[in-house]
Image (spheres, rainbow, N blue to C red):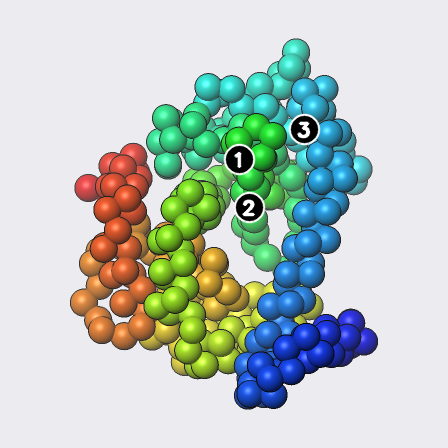
Amino acid sequence: MLKKSILLVLIVAVLFPSVTLAMTSSERTYLLSQIQILTKEVLRLQAILASQNKSYSPQVAGDRIYSGRSGSANYIVEAGLIKNGTRNIDTVHQKLFDHFKDVIGHNEAASHIGRFKVEHVFDPKLEDYIEGYVEYIPTDDSWELTVRRDTTKPLTTKELELFTELYIHEYAHVLAYENPDILNNFREDFWTDRQTMSLSAKANRNFDDYGFSVLDEVYKGNFDQFVSGYAMLNADEDFAETFTWFVENDYPVGTDVRSRKIKYFYGQREMISVRDNVRANLGMD
């Protein structure tokens, strides 16, 4: 990893010498962390493209291959309904997707989601550990929603509450893709100063090795800047985390950066409309 990091810095230094010389140490660290993230994302997308024909063929939808504590189940979504060919749909998986529809709205789910995947994940150090992400499928002009959880455990009310926040967060990524100006303006307003870049670099450092424990440490003392430690990773995650807070909470009264980020969404009519719909779906109004 160290050799790769040095090589990446050298590449940037050669291509943009005046830029790198003018940077502070924290800015160079932040640039390095973002290059590493971008490199991993490129490799991940290359792997997805390489297997796209196989992964998104109708024959694969519904396949489930479990090996010990690993495996996944893939579903096609048509008109907001998950389908599994001629096989029965796992009741927990059905409940997870139904909950997604209940959170963001049945019409919104039907118009955005074309694939649904449930992957098994197990971490003995974390209780009720869940993950999720969305990926755009250009061939279908729709999105694949993936959730990850310990499939050996029954689905609890507490876990569904965690999925509520996760679903709002992931939906924010979809909205950011469809409304790039809103994301770009958010980035320009809150992700161009050196302090934010330095904090993000610190948060990203060793995150892959130590996970959320690193974010929790960095987040201490920076509650006035971000709504969560995860929001410190980059502008996209800050956008999604802040949007989730915006949806679930009342108008902030503070004037710090964290509050100004939340208030930013109150200036976007599209986001206010989504907030109203989600809160109505959840019975919060």
| Residue 66 image offset from top left, x and y in percent | 76, 34
What amino acid type is highlighted by mark number 2? Gly
Q: Assign the C terminus to one quadrant of the image.
A: top left
Residue drawn 57% across and 76% down?
Answer: 30
| Residue 72 image offset from top left, x and y in percent | 69, 35
9 sits left or right of 175 in the view = right
As measured in the structure, the alpha-carbon distance from the residue carrying label 3 to the one carrying label 2 is 18 Å
Of pointers 2 and 1, the one earlier in the residue sequence: 2
| Residue 89 image offset from top left, x and y in percent | 59, 20
Residue drawn 67% across and 24% down?
Answer: 61
Please say if the residues under marks 3 and 1 sit with CB atoms less than 8 Å apart.
no
Mark 3, Cα crowd under 10 Å, few <14 / some 14-19 / many 20+, is some
What amino acid type is highlighted by mark number 3? Tyr
| Residue 97 image offset from top left, x and y in percent | 49, 30
Disc 2 element: strand
Identify the residue under disc 2: 132
**Front-lying residue, 162 or 41:** 41
Of pointers 3 and 2, the one earlier in the residue sequence: 3
Mark 1, Cα crowd under 10 Å, few <14 / some 14-19 / many 20+, is many
Is residue 207 visible in the rendered image? The answer is no
Is residue 258 visible in the rendered image? The answer is yes
Residue drawn 56% across and 65% down?
Answer: 212
Identify the residue under disc 1: 143
Position above or below: 78 against 47: above
Identify the residue under disc 3: 56
Please say if the residues under marks 2 and 1 sit with CB atoms less than 8 Å apart.
no
Q: Assign the N terminus to one quadrant of the image.
A: bottom right
As measured in the structure, the alpha-carbon distance from the residue carrying label 2 to the one carrying label 1 is 13 Å
